Amino acid sequence: MTQHGETVDCIDINKQPAFDHPLLKDHKIQMKPNLPSDFRMEEASTSEGRAHVNFNRIRCPPGTVPILRATKASLARAKDYSHFHPATPESPGLHQAVLEAKPGVLMGGKASGTVYNYEVKSGQKTSSKMWLTSGDRLNSISVGWTIAPDLFNDTLSHYFIEWDDWNPSGFKAGCINLLCQGFVQVDQSAFPGMAFHDVSQDQVTGNWWLYMLSGNISVGYWPAAILPKLRNGASFFSVGGISQAPVGGLNPPIGSGQFPDDDYLHSAFFRELQFVESAGNWEDVQQNTTSVDVDNPACFTLQNTGWDGEINRYVIMYGGPGGSCGA
């Protein structure tokens, strides 16, 4: 049982939900990523005044992995957690403040960010996340935090992962967390929803690995078989916030709920924006490879701060109060 009353089951690693996916019928579990000898997933730097999120840790017996128990109600609510195309978000009432970088072929991405909690009502949801997208924008993988009462049946901030597989005519497959088959979990104590994460591709297998910065833990991976458009790497690295409300309704806040103003104490931010280039090296995002997508600056904005020293590295600040933002 977690600190918020959710139930976590320790499941045989070979019988986890991922292997119900038809493309993973004969999949052999990869227990750890194949990394270059000089590859390091460094823990995020910390400095005074920054908020940190801690979770009660659990540890399953060897040969098992922790899976957050899904109820009939949560599965039903997941169907209403609408997917939107990363390039053209056309879901009614959806607004965003997002930075997109296109530095070349991407084998991974990394960011540190702030997490907030505030009231979000039924029919609304807000998310802050990092995601990688294929060049044709048909495959994407995401990590971040969200407040989505219709999905989780509460108003807490939940950490989440997500994957999407589109075809030119629309949504094909994918889901949030483990509410569909696909993501393969390997760690005995960490599971989707526990901490802010990094993503990178195993250049030997093509699998996309999910890491926890805190503790340098390999949580699990999205197999290459379910994300064919990402097999040769991603093209777009995005970070920012998304708010959604019913048509004609009020949009919930993004980030801290305040417009960015250069103040780390109350502006939501992502810092240390880095990516893994094709040779397996970490590189900082460069401002000349970025573009900003803010569709309603009266509700939300994004400040493309750029380089802010060796500790913070590349930074964006983003957010806003929401409100009557239109369709």
Image (spheres, rainbow, N blue to C red):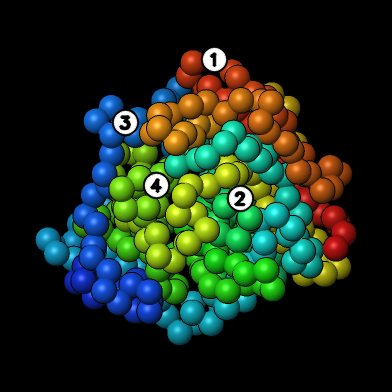
How far from the left and from the top, in percent, is residue 204? 31, 48
Q: Earlier in the sequence, mark 3 or mark 2?
A: 3
Q: Earlier in the sequence, mark 4 or mark 1?
A: 4
Relative height, residue 186 to residue 128 (above, below): below
**Type of amino acid at the residue the image marks with label 3:** Arg
Q: Which residue is mark 2?
A: 135
Is 139 positioned to the left or the right of 245 in the image?
left
> Mark 1 against mark 2, which lies toward the viewer?
2
**Type of amino acid at the residue the image marks with label 4:** Gln
How many numbered marks, from 0 up? 4
Is 20 positioned to the left or the right of 188 in the image?
right
Kindly report the distance in space between the C-alpha atoms of the residues bearing marks 4 and 1: 27 Å
> Mark 3 against mark 2, which lies toward the viewer?
2
Q: Indicate which disc residue 201 carries.
A: 4
The reply to whether residue 72 is visible in this rendering is yes
Q: Which residue is mark 1?
A: 309
How far from the left and from the top, in percent, is residue 301? 77, 39
Q: Earlier in the sequence, mark 1 or mark 2?
A: 2
> Mark 3 against mark 1, which lies toward the viewer?
3
Where on the picture, by quarter, is residue 53?
A: top left
**Type of amino acid at the residue the image marks with label 2:** Gly
Is 298 positioned to the left or the right of 9 in the image?
right
